[in-house]
Image: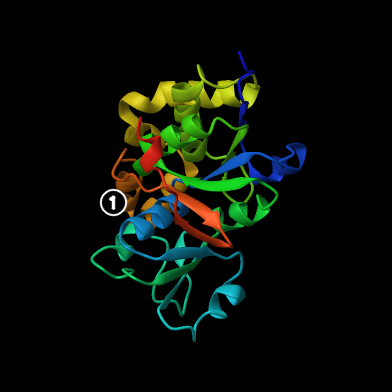
Amino acid sequence: MPDKSSLEVILTPNLLPLYPLQGKVVVVIDVLRATTTMTVALDQGATKVIPVESIEECLSYKDKPDHILAGERGGQKVEGFSYGNSPFEYMDGVVKGKTLVLTTTNGTRAIKMSSDAKEILIGGFLNFTALTRWLLNESTDTVLLCSGWRDKFNLEDTIFAGAIINTLKDYFLVDSDSAFAAEKLYLNSRRNMLHYMKQSSHYKRLAKFGVVNDIKYCLRPDLTNVVPILKGGALVRADISKDMI
């Protein structure tokens, strides 16, 4: 019987240098809100999502046809941008047939930092089952990267990583303290996740900006089968039809 592939949790991007990524799948997690928003954009018909690290790089796309530019810093839309980091901004046909170029405080940076990986996927509660099925089908050494907040630990990304650990631990080799801790956080929070999240710093930060509905939406499971995968510097839909087991 072949050895199981490993499944690890990295609690903050600052710890990435401790984890060789070559040959591995990385799942970038930024539940509130970047990876949720990226998934929504593709679900709503965007041809691709280009994650960029800086505002300047994002603005370099401004003259390209059928490109929508979006920027967020500190939880708020960047001044001068028409769009920010709320998933609700990308519904009702706004991105259908277009390319979204997005820069955010944490999530897009985490994607760029994962460039050595074999594959980079995007995860959030809204594509949870589709994502875990893809990972199970691929059965490759996998790293769950929590984007955190400005390189610091946060609850929401760790809880989501713990949900994946809880679902896949019988199929992968899971033996790290970070994975154990993430799963325990998930088990402690799953019965009333919104209430639990109210203790988190990012919930409080976003609540001050009046976007509690964003938070509620980002915690809803299995709203889509879209799994974003990075191809040629842009996120597109992964072909998951074969993975629906």
Task: Give me the residue at 42% from left, 22% from top.
Answer: 188
- Residue 228 in sight here: yes
Picture coordinates of residue 182, whole percent (x, y):
53, 27
Task: Give me the residue at 62% from left, 44% from top.
Answer: 152
194 sits to left or right of 178: left
**Nearest the eye: 134 or 13:** 134
Looking at the rendered image, the quarter that the C terminus falls into is top left
Find the residue positioned furthest to the top: 1
Mark 1 residue crowding within 10 angstroms, few (<14) / some (14–19) / many (20+):
few
Task: Give me the residue at 50% from left, 39% from top.
Answer: 157
Q: How is the image coloured?
A: rainbow
Find the residue positioned furthest to the left: 92
116 sits to left or right of 31: right
Vertical comparison of 111 with 242: above or below = below
- Residue 198 in sight here: no
Which residue was labeled with disc 1?
213
Could you tell me which secondary element the residue under label 1 belongs to? Answer: helix
Picture coordinates of residue 43, whole percent (x, y):
33, 55
Task: Give me the residue at 60% from left, 13% from top.
Answer: 1
**Nearest the eye: 21 or 89:** 21
**Nearest the eye: 168 or 201:** 168
Give the amino acid at mark 1. Answer: Asn
Vertical comparison of 26 with 95: above or below = above
Picture coordinates of residue 91, whole percent (x, y):
27, 62
Vertical comparison of 166 with 211: above or below = above
- Total numbered circles: 1
Q: Quadrant of residue 177?
A: top right
Q: Quadrant of residue 82?
A: bottom left
Vertical comparison of 141 with 74: above or below = above
Picture coordinates of residue 64, whole percent (x, y):
48, 83
